[in-house]
Image: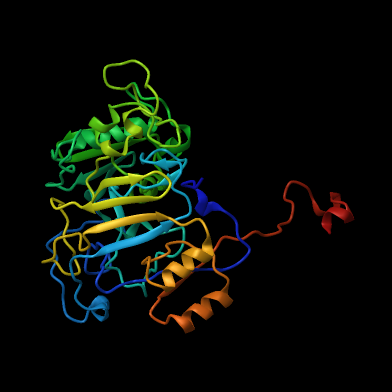
Amino acid sequence: MKSKIDWLTLSFLILLSLILVSCTKATTSTATSPPTSPGITQSISTSSTTTATAANWWDKFGEPKYSGTITFPESDLGGVTLDPINPMGTNILEHFEPLFGYNWTLDPKIWTYTSGWVPPEYYSGILATSWEQKDPTTITVHLRQGVYWQDKPPANGRELNAADVITNVDRLLGLNGFTPNPFMAASLSTVTKAVATDKYTVDFQLKQPSVVAIIQIVASGWGIAAPEWIALGGLASSGGSPAGGGPPAGGGPPVGGGPLGDWKNAVGTSPWTLTDFLQGSVVTYSKNTKYWGYDERHPQNKLPYADTLKIVAIPDIATRLAALQTGNIDMIPDILTPWEQAQSIAKSNPEIQQALVPGAGVSIDLRCDQKPSQISKFERL
């Protein structure tokens, strides 16, 4: 099964990621100018009313159009994770949004987002608009107003607020009755708790002054789930992995897969509402017509552009590549492709855009626990 930490897998090669980008299927965006480096008192701030100017780097893609379906593959849709803090299983989490995300209006010449590490200044607000550090042990996050949960049970379209974020932080850290989640709690290891100062403001209290805290809060990427959904209890994976959450509504242990394992209960704030799920085969998301966001590259355009988002199970790499070449899928987000094959595809299908993504590597280093003279000749070799 696919893990949320599979990006840590070591590789000896620089690998290619094949991505098909359509001019009629634009991605969500944020600020129209490169962000300034974050400081102690102010950083990442965005507005959905930014006006696009002439000669932007994205103008070459043309004007985006509405309608259509975006389709991309997963190797396995057997054990599916519906929960943003469940580290196991295949992740179909397009219904969740994080506080901050990649700034897609940033010129790729400045940063391409193709590496595992992204500096905090290249993130932009999604559910949040900005953050600031009031003192050495307090980071304040300002939430975006007018964000609503998808209009379906159990959240029923109410507005997102600071209490929602605090519930998710408590769930990560194992506070206020929630079961600790050791795996995901590490993503907020510098934080002791989160408190609301008003409906749209959250203070993250730190254990001690830490630069790492800024990275954990701004660049962690964990999605915010509705407290009403969390309170349903049970398992949040069709594969049976524990939800890592608190006590289910009404008390008592979860039964079977539980309500969190039922895709019909999945609710978020994103442009996509989960509307169908065929175990092991295909996941279908439909446009959230009440989504809050606009395309900041084209500020007059409400998001999303496409009507449908589909995730299909295609285990075999060769089959995935064939589906991409024939237009049956629109992209392959992450695929380990030999450079010879990538060159062949570039010749046969020049319309397919390819992105070169650096992979991790291994090295042989000197021992540092002993002086060189104490290491045997065999060990030196």
Quarter assignment of residue 254: top left
* Left or right: 339 in relation to 241: right
Q: Residue, x 36% and y 26% (percent of image)?
A: 234
Residue at 46%, 44% (x, y): give it. Answer: 78
Q: Quadrant of the C terminus?
A: bottom right
Does residue 67 appear left or right of residue 259 in this picture? left
- Residue 140: x and y in percent read 25, 43
Q: Position of residue 57 (x, y in %)?
A: 27, 78
Residue 344 visible somewhere in the drawing: yes
Q: Is residue 192 in sight in this rendering?
A: no
Residue 125 against residue 176 in the figure, above or below: below
Q: Nearer the viewer, residue 19 or 218?
A: 19
Q: How many marks?
A: 0
Locate residue 223: give its quadrant.
top left
Q: Residue at x 53, y 80 (%)?
A: 344
Q: Along the line of sight, which residue is nearer the eye, 279 or 148?
A: 279
User: In which quarter of the view is residue 225 placed?
Assistant: top left
Horizontal side of residue 306 vs 235, given as left or right: left
